[in-house]
Image (spheres, rainbow, N blue to C red):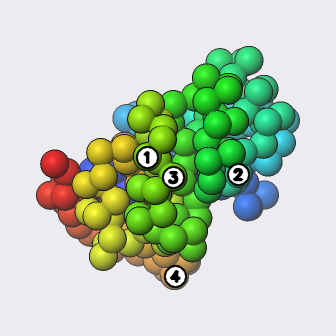
Amino acid sequence: MKALLAGGLPCAEVTFRTPAALEAIRAIAQIPGMLVGAGTVLKPEQAQAAADAGAQFIVTPGFNPRVVGSCVSHGIPITPGVSDPTSIEMALEHGLDVVKFFPAEACGGLPYLKAIAGPYSMMRFIPTGGIEPGNLCDYLAFPKVVACGGTWMVKADLLKNRDWAKITTLTREAVTLANSGKK
């Protein structure tokens, strides 16, 4: 996380695809200036445990009404995953105006996002899934996109080899690219 911060990215999502998620969230929450969230949250209990550990937001891969309802009722910021108009409308019914568009590229990418976003002028999106340097700016140029999620800066081999300098460099490049693509 310090490598991400050094690269200019003060935000990270720790997914619940690892048993170390809560421990990682607790540790990251102690880093000044770092915003940490929990991802791949599938149950209300996971969302609460993540919030108790210091997660400042919750992200889900799909729209689970139990998880979203629990987060909303407990005042925990949540960005549920959507990939179709029905799930966008479910998010609206829960009072949300920002959702994760996932899996972005597998669902048809930016053309599909533009098509499903059309009727929902009040909704904003965070595309994830297949976002990389080659398409990042295209997504960010779409006014309904507020941010993008990507993992190319923190590849498994870089973590395994503790190559913090490379993670910082890739993060700095991603931040520079994202800033150059904003309109």
Pointers 1 and 4 in contact (C-beta within 8 Å): no
Label 2 – label 4 distance at C-alpha: 28 Å
Pointers 2 and 1 in contact (C-beta within 8 Å): no
Q: What residue is disc 2 on?
A: 62
Circle 1 Cα neighbour tier, 10 Å, few/some/many (<14 / 14–19 / ≥20)? few
Q: What residue is disc 4 on?
A: 157
User: Which callout, 1 or 4, points at the residue further toward the start of the chain?
Assistant: 1
User: Which callout, 2 or 1, points at the residue further toward the start of the chain?
Assistant: 2
Q: What residue is disc 3 on?
A: 116
Q: Amino acid at mark 2?
A: Gly
Name the one closer to the observer, 9 or 112: 112
Q: Amino acid at mark 4?
A: Asp
Label 1 – label 3 distance at C-alpha: 6 Å
Pinpoint residue 140: horizontal percent, then vertical percent.
Answer: 30, 54
* Residue 35 seen in render: no
Q: What residue is disc 1 on?
A: 118
Pointers 1 and 3 in contact (C-beta within 8 Å): yes
Q: Residue 182: give its label.
A: none
User: Which callout, 4 or 3, points at the residue further toward the start of the chain?
Assistant: 3
Q: Quadrant of residue 165?
A: bottom left
